[in-house]
Image (cartoon, rainbow, N blue to C red):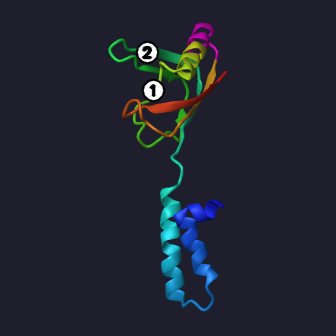
Amino acid sequence: MFYMQHPCIFNYLLTFQFAGLDTMFAVSRIFPFLICSALMAPAHAGTQSGTITGLVNRTSDGLLFFYLSGPASDKASCATSPYWIVKDENSNAGKRLLAMLLMAKATGQSINVTGAGTCSRWVDGEDVDTISL
């Protein structure tokens, strides 16, 4: 069972298994569960829709990033720059994202981007999770 494998939930369940526990003991058992729950909160993932205003592929390290028209919302806290980054441009998924970006740029079609909530490829640009046309 999942709750037996997850220490935060297991501690929480142990608190209510035993009858007659005093309030302070019960609170001391719930507190770690609340801390663990807060630490497991998902990162914010940004979204943006618009046309591609810039598409950059650096030869020095292969970094692939792009800019969109229109406002972005809920970008990850690490994403202080306005561009979006393809996390792994050499993977099959990265190559498919590049093909979609090139097609959208060539035709002027608007795209929708959802971020991954991380900045793993570059410290100030959010990694792309999905692109839809």
Q: Which mark is residue 56?
A: 2
Q: Residue at x 62, y 80 (%)?
A: 16
Left or right relative to 64: residue 60: left
Labels 2 and 1: the sequence-earlier one: 2
Secondary structure of the residue carrying tag 2 is strand
| Residue position for label 1 | 83
**In the rendered image, the vertical position of residue 32 relative to residue 83, given as above or below:** below
Q: Residues within 10 Å of mark 1 (few under 14, many from 20)?
A: some
Assess whether mark 1 and mark 2 are in contact (beta carbons under 8 angstroms).
yes
Q: Provide the secondary structure element on which disc 1 rests.
A: loop
Tell me, yes or no, whether the highlighted magenta stretch contains residue 88. no
Image spot of residue 95 (x, y percent): 54, 16
- What residue range appears in magenta? 101-109
Q: Main secondary structure of the magenta part?
A: helix
The numbered disc on residue 130 is none
Q: Position of residue 103 (x, y in %)?
A: 61, 10
Residue 120, image quadrant: top left
Q: Does the magenta run of residues contain 107? A: yes
The residue type indicated by label 1 comes to Tyr
